[in-house]
Image (spheres, rainbow, N blue to C red):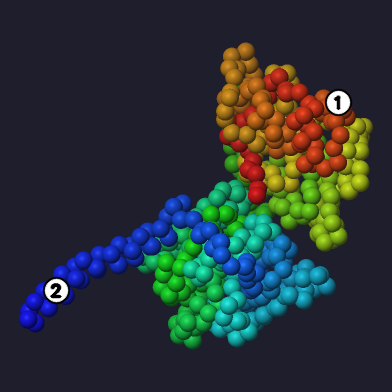
Amino acid sequence: MSYDLRRLLIFFLILVLPAFVFKEYHVLKSARQPQHVVVNEPKPAGPKIDHHFVVVYISNGANAFVEKSLHSICNQDYRHYRVIYVQNGNDAKTQKRVEDCLFGKKFGQRLEILSYVTPVSVAKIYKEILQDCKDEEIIVQLSHHDWLSNYDVLKTLNETYQDDDVWLAYGSRLEYPSMKKVGTLHGRPLLNQQRLMKMPWSQASVKSFYARLLKQVDLDVLAVEFAGDDGVDYNFMVPMLKLAKWHVRYVPQAMSVHNRLNVPSGQPPLVLGKMMDQFSWNLQTCAHLAKGQQVDANRKADLIIMSHNQPYRLDVCLESIFRYVSGLESVYVIYTTDQEHQNLYLQLQEKYAQVCFRLGQNAFKTVVLGILKNQTSSSEFVAVATDNQLVQKKIQLGECIQAITQTEADVFYLNMESEGMLSKRNYSHVLPDRIHIMQPDQKTMAVPLNLVLYRKEELLHNLDKIDFNSSSTLIQAWQQGIGLPQMGLYYEQSKAVQLN
């Protein structure tokens, strides 16, 4: 009889055990392949919950981008959250910049600052933070030197955690300055030796989890074992992953911007980045001249950027423009804002003294036409963009102007992929291989402000005959009241991307 029971038990295990193994394998495989994992839809039954978030930002030593990071955190379009800024290591300059940036602002009341003169482990930092965290609070961790990609990140996470099965959530990120969307990065060699840490969440810039989940991790052991580890969080994230198992969710939206200019060098990151860009651009220019295609560097164009209540996004846009675009005559920003964002725009005016800021609150069209009629500018061309345009490749406006002049094209689209190209048989002797000709249609006319270079006189004539009072109404009126250009130019590879 006992022999039959053993056989029955073995037979039962043979049938049941593969089901558990397959389920665990499916969970781990899904976590490694974020493109196949989506956030669960919120449950239809029951009232919506406004979760309370605790955003933790740990700055290790000097941080050239601390203002950008904190502004992206403290200006979230969500009410139920507080911010803990941790200065892990004595850096008086960064500390002073943080105080100047945050104290006295409306979000100062929800901000807490922790300072450590001597750097400590992340586990020890979180042990102190957890003392004041409730179990149901959700901790959002942002990596050093990175910032949130938009003002709706906490709203997105709140929707994610409407599902009770979500205990830990993470998202993809954009890499600055290329702004390419990525889900993983190749980390230390240690990552390749640990199966769990090959998942994309382990390298996500933003991770979120319930405080009660982290409280189940023995931080005392980790604080001793990894006492010299400054800023590396995956030592205690692995135990949480083991606890959460299939309660981990991937958020498809990019929630953060990972700063690739963070270099361990004595030079400021932007300075080093510009030097590298200039070196590569000089090589490209030499190759261009070797083909006998001389570019008139004296041909310049004005630039008009339109912004509405997005000072943070405008800052990123301007940084990319001044880094990658050459041949600018004058740069104008026409902005509309509420009282909440007014001070941030004033700070941008101080940062970009070479830019002319114009408030278009009550006379948007008048301001636009006034810039186009400005007689002090000698340029006959103007590029127009909204603040969600981010330049990621070098642009020489002199080359664009020369191409428009030689082909008699109407516009040059700087943010457009290769499609619908026409034959450039008649212009092959004047156009480089990377520039193509197209006949614009309704699809391209839907984005007249996506970094497009126009003849200033023609643009003034077209805008003068339509009514608009903002960038959005300008696009609508444009589609209805302005005809299609006969011919447009564009690069084979788009020079810019569009931010969310």
Label 1 sits on a secondary structure element that is: helix
Q: Is residue 63 above or below residue 236?
A: above
Q: Residues within 10 Å of mark 1 (few under 14, many from 20)?
A: few
Residue 404 point in image, percent of width and height: 72, 23
At x 60%, y 48%, the residue is 178
Between disc 1 and disc 2, whose residue precedes? 2
Residue 409 point in image, percent of width and height: 71, 21
**In this view of the protein, can residue 3 be seen by the observer?**
yes
At x 81%, y 70%, the residue is 105
Hey, which quadrant is residue 349 in on the image?
A: bottom right
Q: Is residue 486 above or below residue 78?
A: above
At x 61%, y 26%, the residue is 435
Residue furthest out toward the front: 45
103 relative position to 202: left or right = right
At x 60%, y 82%, the residue is 134
Hey, which quadrant is residue 491 in on the image?
A: top right
Q: Amino acid at mark 2?
A: Leu
- Residue at image mark 2: 8
Residue furthest out toward the top: 426
Residue 484 point in image, percent of width and height: 73, 23
Residue 408 point in image, percent of width and height: 73, 18
Q: Amino acid at mark 1?
A: His
User: For the N terminus, which image quadrant?
Assistant: bottom left
Q: Mark 1 or mark 2, which is nearer to you?
A: 2
- Label at residue 461: 1
**In this view of the protein, can residue 204 be seen by the observer?**
no
